[in-house]
Image (spheres, coloured by chain):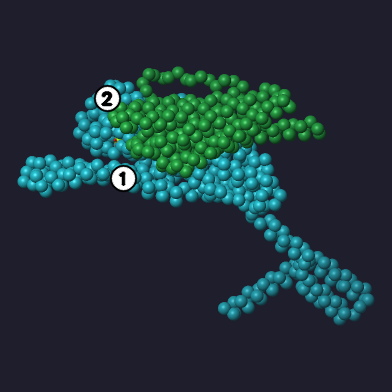
Chain colours: A green, B cyan
Amino acid sequence: MLTQHTVRAYDEELQFLARKIAAMGGQAERMVDQAINALVNADHALAQKVVQDDLLLDEAEREIDDKAILVIARRQPMATDLREIIGAIRISADLERVGDLGKNIAKRVAAVAEGRQPNSLFRGLEALAELALTQLKDVLDVYASRSVERIGIVRDRDEQIDAMYTSLFRELLTYMMEDPRNITPCTHLLFVAKNIERIGDHATNIAETIYYIVTGEQMPPERPKEDRSHGVTLADDGKSG
Amino acid sequence: MAETSTQTRTRRTAKLTAGRLYQNRWMLAAAILAVLAVDLFGAASAGFTAATIVALVLVALVAPRTPAARRLAEASARVERSPLDRLSGEKLAAAVAEPLIIFDRDGAVVHANEAADTAFGAMTPPLPLLLKFRAPEMQALIEAALSGEGTAQATDYVERVPFERVYRVTASAVGRGTGLFVLAFKDQSEARRIDRMRADFIANASHELRTPLASIAGFVETLRGPARNDPNARDQFLQIMQDQTGRMARLIDDLLSLSRLEMKPYLKPGVRVDLRQTVDAVIDSLAPLAAGSAVVVERDFAEGPLEVQGDRDELFQVFQNLLENACKYGRSGGRVVVSMKRSAEARQPEIEVTVRDFGPGIPDEHIPRVTERFYRVDVETSRAHKGTGLGLSIVKHILTRHGARLSIRSKQGEGSAFTVHLPAA
Ligand SMILES: Nc1ncnc2c1ncn2[C@@H]1O[C@H](COP(=O)(O)OP(=O)(O)OP(=O)(O)O)[C@@H](O)[C@H]1O
Ligand SMILES: [Mg+2]
């Protein structure tokens, strides 16, 4: 009876960690989405909100760390459970960074909004952010369903994000060279693009952690490129389990 | 009228009494025999015996067939065994067109109907709901339902990727003490999309229409002023104006078809489409353009069935846009190859259609961007071809709806290959 009770409490502790991670993920997804919206629509109030919301993520990370350490100390978990707990610590660190990057984007809204930049730049940033957000969503969906066989698309999309980032980078440089007055706002946009690209990287890190949690192995390295010609895949991979 | 109702009543009474007699036949026969036996042994007068028998028959006629209590019990049993009882929750959920998710006290999915799986991806029980719906307002909603606060709670929920959807979501307990809860979604995306479409349309159209309008206005001015008496210039200007109005008309067509696609991001169930036929029709329909650009279109179709599930007209538009681009931008290569084959490489068998040209190709940094709205690698070349920069974004939209992918490969100086990967039917 007693052992059963202990097992149940232990399970609940692990569930608590998983739920906390999901809630953090939801918050991070929301912050990134709102930061980009604020940037595109020059919405200062929304940007302000994003900056404040970052506190929630910091707090959640601390809470997860504390809880995880407590569980390790009290239960001395083995194998799978230990991976689960260490994984939670790692994922929450990545999510906290995603929140920071969102906050950083929001902080640039005012500087960017000063001069009006060409629409195509914002469309490009939106497209990049959509890729990064899809990446984050898919990865967190896999955390929920544990269906790691779906994780391959994460690598593909990581490549897409890099390619898109490079393209935006060049476009921004061109604008800066055309007219020196563009330099300040375009520099901010460059950082925004870089931040979005890094959000994608964190999502990929999380994918690797999940793979490790579920299988106990490292995620297989990138597949070799089929040929040297440049290619890109635009996929509808949103529907993951 | 009155007569028939009397008739039916008489008939019903007759049936009822006949039934009673029949049901009581054994008891009746036994009683009559007993009375006759008593009569035989001379215990009673013949008149008394006859009267007794008549009385017995009368009782048998009047006595109800089933006791009142049993009749009541049967009536109530009929109510309990109503067709609803035999209906499983699963079937009921399947009949609901909007997403519906049933979950238990631990917040684990017990059942998700088909609409829910389509909208949010397969949810195999016992997927923890709180891990799947991470938006802060959904977390609050589900937690409130689980902790049994009040009855039904509701919130608005926006799912952004892969395309925007807006739902009104209600969470409530199922019955009393079942330990089950239900999350019901009401899709309100359409209203939101109409708003967005209007704003987008105005922003995009006004921006893109300004240039051709300005140029037309300029030519009109010249025609009325300096070039009034110059027939050569007049012809030339009118030609340019005609091209510009053509471009504006195309732009509006493209914007409308893009908006229409965005209005209904889900594909209706669709039919079996024979790609061989569709692609052939596309090639035929673009024969004049190919001839005009001095491009030879070659076919390289694999043997066997090349069928997919989808919307024929939309798929037609996909290949039309790709082939049109190949002829326009790759004309210097002199030929375009359209190939089609089955591929078993992916988890699910796919049909791959590739439109390959041998033109200048697309510089690396532009490849990831060409499906963005209004994105043109070289605005001047595209304008010269009356391009609007919407062709590939329409392609991307249609493919997303078909659960398909587009991959682009290009090497500068060697040409480009656009490949559509469609799930095989
Ligand atoms: N086969 C190709 N080779 C080289 N460049 C291409 C090719 N296909 C597309 N592009 C480039 O991609 C851009 C976007 O193509 P898209 O079809 O979306 O627009 P468009 O052709 O300009 O206009 P529309 O198709 O609406 O008339 C084109 O402007 C062109 O620069
Ligand atoms: Mg085109």
Position of B265 with respect to B223 (left or right) is right
Decide: marks 1, 2 in contact (CB < 8 A)?
no
Q: Is mark 2 within 8 Å of ligand 1?
A: yes
Query: Which of the two marks, 1 or 2, is nearer to us in this view?
Result: 1
Q: Which quadrant does ligand 2 occupy?
A: top left
Residue B189: x and y, percent?
47, 48
Q: Chain of mark 1?
A: B
Q: Amino acid at mark 1?
A: Ala
Residue A70's tag is none
Q: Amino acid at mark 2?
A: Pro
| Gap between marks 1 and 2 measured at Cα | 30 Å
Q: Chain of mark 2?
A: B
Figure quadrant of the N terminus of chain B: bottom right
Q: Viewer-proximal residue, A24 or A80?
A: A24
Identify the residue shown where x is 66% and y is 34%: A15
Furthest residue toward bottom: B47
Residue B69: x and y, percent?
78, 65
Would you place residue B188 above or below residue B394 in this image?
below
Q: Residues within 10 Å of mark 1 (few under 14, many from 20)?
A: some
- What residue is disc 1 on? B205
Q: Viewer-proximal residue, B83 or A44?
A: A44
